[in-house]
Amino acid sequence: MNRICELTGAEFPLFAFSHCRDVVAAVSKAGGFGVLGATRFSPEQLEQELAWIDSHVDGAPYGVDVLVPEVIDPRVSELSDNKSRAAAIDPAYQGFVNSVLGQYGIAPEAEMPILRERMGITPENGLALMEVAFRHPIRLIANALGIAPPAMIKEGKQRGVPVTALVGAKEHAIRQAEAGVDIIVAQGTEAGGHCGEVSTLVLVPEVVRELAHHGYDIPVLAAGGIMTGGQMAGMMAAGAQGAWTGSVWLATPEAETSEAFRAKMVAARSRDTVRSRSRTGKPARQLKTAWHDAWDAPGGPGTLPMPLMGMVSEPAFARIEREAASGNKGANELVSYFVGQGVGLVEQVRSSRQVVQDFREEFLDAIGSLAASVGME
Amino acid sequence: MNRICELTGAEFPLFAFSHCRDVVAAVSKAGGFGVLGATRFSPEQLEQELAWIDSHVDGAPYGVDVLVPEVIDPRVSELSDNKSRAAAIDPAYQGFVNSVLGQYGIAPEAEMPILRERMGITPENGLALMEVAFRHPIRLIANALGIAPPAMIKEGKQRGVPVTALVGAKEHAIRQAEAGVDIIVAQGTEAGGHCGEVSTLVLVPEVVRELAHHGYDIPVLAAGGIMTGGQMAGMMAAGAQGAWTGSVWLATPEAETSEAFRAKMVAARSRDTVRSRSRTGKPARQLKTAWHDAWDAPGGPGTLPMPLMGMVSEPAFARIEREAASGNKGANELVSYFVGQGVGLVEQVRSSRQVVQDFREEFLDAIGSLAASVGME
C-alpha cells in the first residue's frame, strides 16, 4: 500500500503496540502489524514470549518495542542498579502510598514493597532486551522514549530491521533522524502512556514537514487517539503513512488488562484521563483516579524521577488490582492504567482480530465516502 | 457537497472564524464560508461591519458569531453592568499588571485603565449583537461559549438561519442538541481561544457518535488545529462534515493581528501556546509569554471570572501592542493573542483568498492520494 508496508512487510499499515503476545500474533495474522512492548519482561521472559510468537504468527511480520532510557536526571544517573536505586528512595514515599491506599480500604503495608530486583525501565534492561529481540525474525524494533541508542541503530542496519522512534515534538523528530532511525512515530498528547503536549492532528503534519525541510525522507506513523479506521484514514490524509495504536488493544480479551480495568474503559469518557508524572516519573497519560489527584496536588510529596517513581507506584498498582479482583470496592476506584483520550471511543470489548477487521472496513468506508463527496468514485 | 453545504449555502465546507470583515468577505467569495466574530463590537459598529460585508460579498453566504455567556459565577452574577463590574475589581490587580509590564520596559499607569464603558463579553451585549446580526442576510449564527440562548434558537428557526454552537465535550453536545441547535462545532483542546481538554481527533468522532446514540441528526464541524486541506479531509474521514477554522486566518494581511504578532506566528512552534485563564477568565489557548507565566504561577494573584478578567487584561494587551509597534523590544516579548497549536504549521503570511485556494487543492490532493493508495481512482 505504501512505503511503511514495504519497510515492515505489513499488509495494512495498522501498528498495534501491546504487552500481550496474543494481541501481537492476532493483529499480524489479520494483516496489521503487532509490536510487543517488552519493557516489563526480563530477557529470559522476552525470549519465551518471542519464541511463542514465532510459532503462532504463521510467518506474518511483527516487531518489538523496548525502552532504553537516556538517563540524564542527576538524581539517578549515579545509581547503576535497582538495589542502589531502591536505597535512594525516601521511606516517606511509602508512607504517602499507604495513606492514599488506606483512604480506599487497602490496609497499609509494614515494609516498602518496592521492586528491588525485578527488571524495570533501566538502560541495562533495555539493552539486554534489545539483544534478545534481534535474535528473532523481527521486522521492526522501536525505542519508546528518547533517542534510539547507537547500538540499536547499528544492529538494525546490519540486520535490515527498521528502527522506529516515538516523538512528541518536531525537534525530537530531527534528533531521531540525525541518530539514524528509519521510521518515526509522531505521538500526540492524547496518547496513552508517555506523551508530549501537542495534539496528533497538529503534530503529524508538523513532523512530516520538518523532516522534509531538513532533507530527511523518513515515513511517519500517527499515534495518539486513534481507535477507528476513519481516524486512521484521517491521519493519513494529514500526512502519515499509517497508524500506531495502543489503547484500542487494551479493550480486547487477549490483553493484559484486568476485567475491572476493561469495564472502566467501556464506561470512561475522553475527559477521564490525565497526563501525570505520578506513575513512571515522566508525563504519561492514564485513567484518572484519586491516586493522580493525590500525587499531583500542590501539597503532595512531589514525584520521583524515572525509574524510581515506578519502583514506588507499580507495587501499589499491583496491590490495587489484587484487592479489586477480590471484591474491594474502594480498591476498584483506584484501578488505573496507561490509556489515551481515545478511551472515550471504546464501547465494548472486542477480539483483536475483530478490531483489525473493523479498522479495515472503517478505513475503506471513510475513503470511499470522502472520494464520493468530491465526485471521485 | 454535503448537508452542511445545503444548510449554509457554502460551496466548500471550510468555515472561517475571523474578527475582520475583509477575511469574512474574501473567504465567502472564494467558496468557503466566512463567520464574523462580533463580540468586540458595539451594536452600532456591528451594523456598519455587516453593511460593509453585504456590499462586498457578492451575494455569497456568510455568518456571525456572538458570545452570549451564561453567567453562573456567583462573583459576577449580581453585577449587571460594566460600571458595577469595574467597581468589583480589587485595585491590587492593576498593581500586578503594572509589575508584569514594568519588567518588560512598559512604565506603570497611575490609574486602572479598565474598560469601564466599552462593550465586552456580557449577556446584554451578546443579545444586542444577535439582534443586529438577524437584520442582515446571514446564513449562520453561532454562540461561541455555553448553551445557545433560547432567543437565538427561536429567531434562528423563524428566519431559517441555522444556529451553531461550539462544544469541547460530548455532554455539552447533547445539551446543545436539547436546546435546539442545528450545527455543532466540536472544538478540540488544540484550538485557539476558549477550548476544552479533549483533542480534535478524539472529540469529533466522540461527539458524532454521542449525537447519533441520542437520536440527534445534527451535522458536526471539526475545529482545533486545522491549518491545511489535508487535515480538513482527515477530520471529515473521522466523521465531520467540514472544518471550522480560526488561527489560520490570523496570519493573513487582512486580519486584525499586528505585524508583530504575525511575525511571531511564523516563528512559533506548536508547543509555544498555552491554555490559560489569564486573559478572559476561562481557559483559552493563546501564544505563551511571560504574561501567562506570571498569572498562572502559584504565587500570582489568581485570575478573575469572565468578564472581569478581560476588563483587566485587554487594556494591558492594547498597551503592549502600542508599545511594541513603537519599537519597545521588551513589549514585543509580551505580544500575544488567541491562537491554537496549529500556529506551528504557519510558514508565511498569505492572503485569505490564497488560503482558501490552498485548502481546496490540498483537500483534493489528500483524498486523491488516499483513494489511490487503496486502488480507487
Image (cartoon, coloured by chain):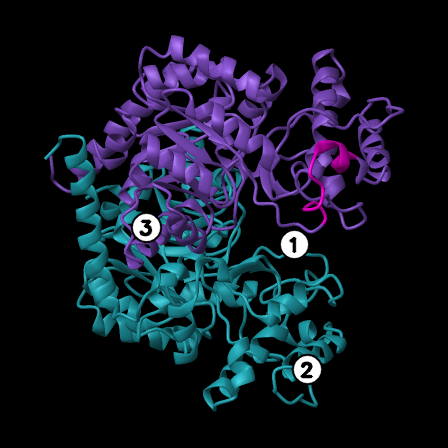
Chain colours: A purple, B cyan
Residue A164 appears in the figure:
no
- Looking at the picture, which amino acid does disc 1 mark? Ile
Picture quadrant where residue A206 is located: bottom left
- Residue visible at 49% across and 58% down in the picture: B271
Q: Which mark lies nearer to you, 1 or 2?
A: 2
Q: Is disc 3 in contact with disc 2, using a CB cutoff of under 8 Å? A: no
**Could you say whether the residue bearing mark 2 is in a helix, strand or loop?**
helix
| Residue B146 image point, x, y percent | 53, 51
The N terminus of chain B is located in which quarter?
top left
Say whether mark 2 and mark 3 are on the same chain.
no
Chain under disc 2: B
Work out whether residue B202 or residue A277 is closer to the camera in this orientation and state it: A277
Nearest the camera: A281 or B250?
Answer: A281
Residue at 42%, 19% (x, y): give it.
A24
**Label 2 environment density (alpha carbons within 10 Å; few <14, some 14–19, many ≥20):** some
Q: Which mark is residue B98?
A: 2
Relative to B277, residue A145 above or below: above
Q: Is residue A200 left or right of residue A94?
A: left
Please name the residue that numbered disc 1 is placed on.
Answer: B72
Residue A293, percent across and down? 72, 40
- Letter of the chain that mark 3 sits on in the rendering: A
Mark 1 near mark 3, Cβ–Cβ under 8 Å? no
Q: What amino acid type should be assigned to the residue bearing mark 2?
A: Asn
Q: Which residue is mark 3?
A: A208
Q: CA distance from mark 3 to mark 2?
A: 43 Å
Q: Secondary structure at mark 1?
A: loop
Q: Which residues are magenta?
A: A75-86
CA distance separating discs 1 and 2: 30 Å
Kind of element beneath mark 3: helix
